[in-house]
Each structure stands twice: as structure tokens, then as C-alpha cells.
């Protein structure tokens, strides 16, 4: 009899556990409410962007996208506020010096990637066809000299060295009505001798390595700088998150140069975002913008910013 009672108790316990498990599986706990309330309190495009990255399927996701887009549109310069369609053009003209065609083929897609993604994030339709109707033309002009030397024994895979490279050009956003934002750039990398630390194996070379070794970091900064001037610096903050920062690294320097007071509070909030990995970049940008040397304590930054009254020094 005792054994039967024990079996009945065990069965009852197991049944209760299964029912409880079934209910918990059907009723997904709400874990995004705190993040949603935080995004609403901050009322910045990057706050809603952060929420969408953490909770893309949330019931508040549609509202988050709507609020993000509304704030991004409000941040546009008046001349560019009604812009809906933009044509993206990349012009390349290099002086070739025993440089494989591969390098020319990858540079245009690389420099246009950041521009296209940023323009789309700003809510614009990007068109490439010159015959398509558009409100503005965004042009990236690339020139200079890409140079390298192949080494290797016959029959073996060649080793490729960057020796000297110069890049120059301009980034321009021009409205149909005549308004224009233009930034010029120039840069150089490498030397006439192949340094061992810059040695690249040709078949393993990635576009990002080619980009960095060709001295194109300045191009990325100008791409972001022109877009930040036209559509507001807060738009660039989302490009500090790892998903985009791995592909486009121009936002950091552009934010530091723009020194927009509207980006200070969102950057301070980012200092506290260890889970997204943006805190280090946020501190570096804040230091460059403000001249302050605070580190990874957001409260220290907040106290300083409160004393500033929302204003940056000259």
C-alpha cells in the first residue's frame, strides 16, 4: 500500500511539472519591456535602433521602427528634408603600376557599401541607374595609384606585397535644386620597399585588408561626414555597433569631427552598453569631441555633461 501511494505521489509530481513546463513554454515571458521603456525615455534614433537589435521580433518593434525613422527624418538638414531618392555613383580613375586588376575591382564596391547602407538607413531609396528619377546624386570619386609587387617561385602561389599606394578624390552629395555638400580626401600608404608586416598572400587577401593597406580610411570618414552633415550626426551612431562596424569604419572619425551636441547623451549611454560592445568606441569618440579624459564610468560623463548645460566648447 505504501509503495502504491509513493507511485501515486511521484506521478502527481511529474504531471504537475509537465503542466507547469507546458504553460511556461506557451507563455513566453516578457523580457523586452524594460528595454522598450528605456528606449522611450531616451527618445533618440540609436536608442530605438538598439532595441530593434536586441528584440527584432518584439510586439513593440513596429513602433520602434516608426519612432526611429521619425527622429532620423527630423534630424535632416532643411535642404535635404524632402529627399526620397538618391542616385549613388562611384567613379574610379587610377594610374596603374603593376597592380593586379583585382584591386580595382574590389575598391568601388567597398567604398560604396558604407554610403549605400547609410543612405538606406536614413530612409532613402538608393538607385544606380542614371536614367532613374532622383532628388539628389551622391558621388564618390576615387583616383590615385595602387601599387604592389608579386613574388614567388614558378609553379607556386604568388605572394603579394603592397609597396606604395596613393588615393585621392572627393565625396559629394548634390541636390537637384543646387544645394551641395562636398568633402575632399587624399592619403598614402606603404613604401617603395615591401615591409614584412604588410605582406599579404594574394589568394588570402580580403577586401578589408586591401582597403586598409591602400590608405582608404579617409574615404570612409568622408562618406560618413557628408551623410552626417546632410542627415544629422545621430544617424551615424548605429554604425558603431559590431554588425556594421566590421564592414564600415568611417563613423567614428566623422562623429568626432562633427561634434554634434545631440550625439553626446547617446554616446554616454553607449558607455554603459557592455553587452553590445560599443563602449570602447563611445569613450574614444567622446574624448575626441570634448577634450575630456574620463574613462568607462557613464556617471562621470553624465555629471560633466550636466555641468556643461548641453553645450560643447569651441
Image (tube, rainbow, N blue to C red):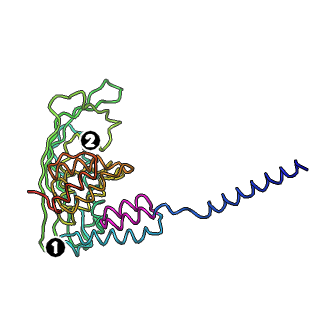
Query: Which quarter of the rendered picture does the C terminus lie within?
Result: bottom left
Q: Which residues are magenta?
A: 33-56
Instruction: Give residue 264's position: percent from left, percent from top.
Output: 22, 58
Q: Which residue is mark 1?
A: 79
Q: Which residue does the image show at 33% across and 68% down from the upper left?
A: 68
Q: Which mark is residue 210?
A: 2
Q: How many marks?
A: 2
Q: Is residue 253 magenta?
A: no
Q: Is residue 42 magenta?
A: yes
Q: Secondary structure under badge 1?
A: helix
Q: Residues within 10 Å of mark 2 (few under 14, many from 20)?
A: some
Q: Which residue does the image show at 13% across and 58% down from the upper left?
A: 312
Residue 203 horizontal side relative to residue 99, left or right: right
Is 98 above or below relative to 272?
A: above
Q: Which residue does the image show at 19% across and 38% down from the upper left?
A: 147
Chain-order first, disc 2 or disc 1: 1
**Of residues 153 and 222, the one drawn nearer to the viewer in this rendering:** 222
Q: Secondary structure under badge 2?
A: helix
Instruction: Give residue 127's position: percent from left, percent from top.
Output: 29, 67
Instruction: Give residue 276's position: percent from left, percent from top.
Output: 37, 51
Amino acid at each position: 500500500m505504501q509503495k502504491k501511494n509513493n507511485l501515486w505521489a511521484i506521478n502527481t509530481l511529474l504531471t504537475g511539472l509537465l503542466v507547469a513546463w507546458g504553460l511556461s513554454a506557451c507563455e513566453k515571458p516578457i523580457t523586452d519591456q524594460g528595454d522598450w521603456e528605456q528606449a522611450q525615455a531616451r527618445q533618440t534614433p540609436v536608442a530605438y535602433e538598439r532595441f530593434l537589435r536586441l528584440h527584432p521580433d518584439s510586439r513593440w518593434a513596429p513602433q520602434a521602427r516608426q519612432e526611429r525613422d521619425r527622429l532620423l527624418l527630423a534630424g535632416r538638414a532643411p535642404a535635404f528634408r524632402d529627399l526620397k531618392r538618391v542616385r549613388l555613383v562611384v567613379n574610379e580613375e587610377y594610374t596603374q603600376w603593376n597592380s593586379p586588376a583585382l584591386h580595382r575591382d574590389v575598391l568601388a564596391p567597398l567604398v560604396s557599401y558604407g554610403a549605400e547602407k547609410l543612405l538606406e538607413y536614413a530612409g532613402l531609396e538608393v538607385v544606380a541607374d542614371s536614367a532613374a528619377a532622383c532628388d539628389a546624386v551622391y558621388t564618390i570619386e576615387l583616383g590615385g595609384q595602387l601599387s604592389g609587387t608579386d613574388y614567388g617561385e614558378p609553379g607556386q602561389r604568388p605572394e603579394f606585397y603592397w609597396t606604395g599606394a596613393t588615393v585621392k578624390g572627393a565625396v559629394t552629395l548634390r541636390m537637384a535644386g543646387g544645394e551641395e555638400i562636398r568633402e575632399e580626401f587624399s592619403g598614402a600608404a606603404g613604401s617603395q620597399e615591401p615591409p614584412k608586416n604588410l605582406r599579404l598572400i594574394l589568394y588570402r587577401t580580403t577586401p578589408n585588408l586591401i582597403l586598409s593597406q591602400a590608405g582608404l580610411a579617409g574615404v570612409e570618414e568622408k562618406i560618413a561626414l557628408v551623410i552626417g552633415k546632410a542627415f544629422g550626426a545621430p544617424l551615424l551612431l548605429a554604425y558603431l555597433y559590431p554588425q556594421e562596424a566590421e564592414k564600415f569604419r568611417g563613423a567614428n572619425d566623422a562623429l568626432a569631427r562633427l561634434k554634434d551636441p545631440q550625439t553626446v547623451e547617446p554616446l554616454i549611454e553607449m558607455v554603459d552598453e557592455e553587452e553590445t560592445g560599443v563602449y570602447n568606441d563611445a569613450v574614444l569618440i567622446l574624448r575626441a569631441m570634448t577634450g575630456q579624459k574620463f574613462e568607462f564610468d557613464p556617471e562621470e560623463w553624465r555629471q560633466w555633461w550636466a555641468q556643461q548645460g548641453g553645450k560643447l566648447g569651441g
